[in-house]
Image (cartoon, rainbow, N blue to C red):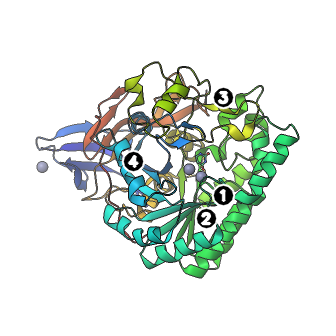
Amino acid sequence: MGTLFKNGTIVTASDEVVGDILVEGEVITLIGQSLDSDGHDVVDCTGKYILPGGIDVHTHLDLPFGGTISNDDFDTGHKAAAFGGTTTHIDFVIQPIGGSLADGLKTWRQKADGIAQIDYGFHMAITDLRDEIMDEIPSLLEEGITSLKLFMAYKNVYMIDDSTLYRAMQKAADNGMLVMVHAENGDVEALLTPQLIAEGKTDPIYHASSRPPEIEGEATNRAIVMSGMTGCPLYIVHMTCEESIDAIRRGRSQGAPVMGETCVQYFFLTVDEHLGAPGYEGSKFVCSPPIRSEKDHAILWKAVQDGTLQHISTDHCDFWYEGGVGPWKEWMEAHNGTDWVGYEKQDPSYRRPGKELGKGNFSKIPNGMPGIEDRMMVIWEHGVNTGRLSPTKFVELMSTNPAKIFGMYPKKGTIAIGSDADLLIWDPEAKHTISAETHHMRVDYNCYEGMTVTGKPVMVYQRGKKLVDGDEWLGQNGAGEFIKRKPHAPVL
Ligand code: DUC
Ligand code: ZN
Ligand code: ZN
Ligand code: ZN
């Protein structure tokens, strides 16, 4: 006995066709037209699209960062993701400075084990590439971790130097792994920030002045050159501006094995309107790299249309706007500042600090914003409904490309016989107004507050099990599975 999805418009990265899908157990076993109901549960999909579950390869759930921890964890973040049509994500394990990769992985496994509601994978963020860590890298392949992340920004926290990046690329290339970079020139940022603060430029809008597009373009180009020299496949996260898009286009045209993504917020938000919002509101929109300008929005749409960029992720990393209530300082001290797991259960009145940490000094605003729930609806509205993207291109960007690049295809990322039955029943007529009042993310604001979208997932299935039915949540903690990814990443 399976589930038969009847008469939906099945969309993959290549085709759009009306038909039926049979799911037996966790996988798709048959695709056809006018399939026999044959005792199966029938889901009538007439007038609906059937899309492969969305994949977001760039999230930070439960991340200790900027003097606090990102709000959504592997429970709340997963529910929110699924309500928005994302059924798989890849989060970042952070190697503790002085510790091993295995230490980092243990910490992140604890965040997800028994808690995860959707399927997930991990990238490994390397912060401290000592000789023994170089030797440890190949062991990640057995864990199903096939991508390394390095930060060219966040000096004195995560930033690595050029020789470290180069060595990591050599090692990755030798082992069939992919390198990802956060590309901003952290040395220049670390010089500009104190200069701005000393000049009294402390408001959120100056966050953008401390990280101008030139330092993103410069670092992007530097990483691309190293990718060309080492032959290491490189994936540049959160690209925002003309400077870096020009660099990746040049690199790809010269044959460097480079790919890239942008994030939803970089198509919509601007320095003037959002970072420059009255009072302290701009802090809501502080992320790195910063949001840019209308001119950059147009450049990004072009870059996803023409294949310069392969994916639209979120960099979901959310913090309270009005946080700081509760005995958080004492709590953090009592827990040695490191053991965050399960803290809500210990003290229900605790509320972790958020954006208010940077009042009077933009450089202390925790970097990041919510988006994991909004991503697919917002890009459908402004991509598909405007004619910028076809439904097939939408599927390619949101699901197929990230599955291929990160070694999950065809288990994830498509609708095919044998693939996981991660399916979205997407109603192209359903209207929804995005708001913090109704979203499922654990955060008190939404970047797209008041935006009305037409088209949303009305039912969401993962491996054949229904997670979302309208407003109802049917998933359960521990049902989300860790995805062991494959080593060789093709260059798209
Ligand atoms: N940028 C953010 O805005 N948040 C998390 C980490 C990052 O690089
Ligand atoms: Zn049958
Ligand atoms: Zn980053
Ligand atoms: Zn990030």
Q: CA distance from mark 1 to mark 2?
A: 8 Å
Question: Which residue is labeled 2 in the image?
Answer: 308
Q: CA distance from mark 2 to mark 3?
A: 37 Å
Image disc number at residue 356 = 3
| Callout 2 secondary element | loop
Q: Which residue is mark 4?
A: 107
Which dot, 3 or 1, sits closer to the camera?
Answer: 3
Of the pair 133 and 259, the residue shown nearer to us: 133
Answer with left or right where residue 173 lies relative to residue 465. right
Give the x, y percent position of residue 227: 59, 75
Tell me the quarter of the image containing the N terminus: top left
At label 4, counting other C-alpha atoms closer than 10 Å, the crowd grade (few under 14, some 14-19, many 20 or more) is: some
Label 1 Cα neighbours within 10 Å, binned few <14 / some 14-19 / many ≥20: some
Which numbered tag is attached to residue 302?
1
The earlier-in-sequence mark between 4 and 3 is 4
Relative horizontal placement of residue 219, taking residue 148 as reference (left or right): right
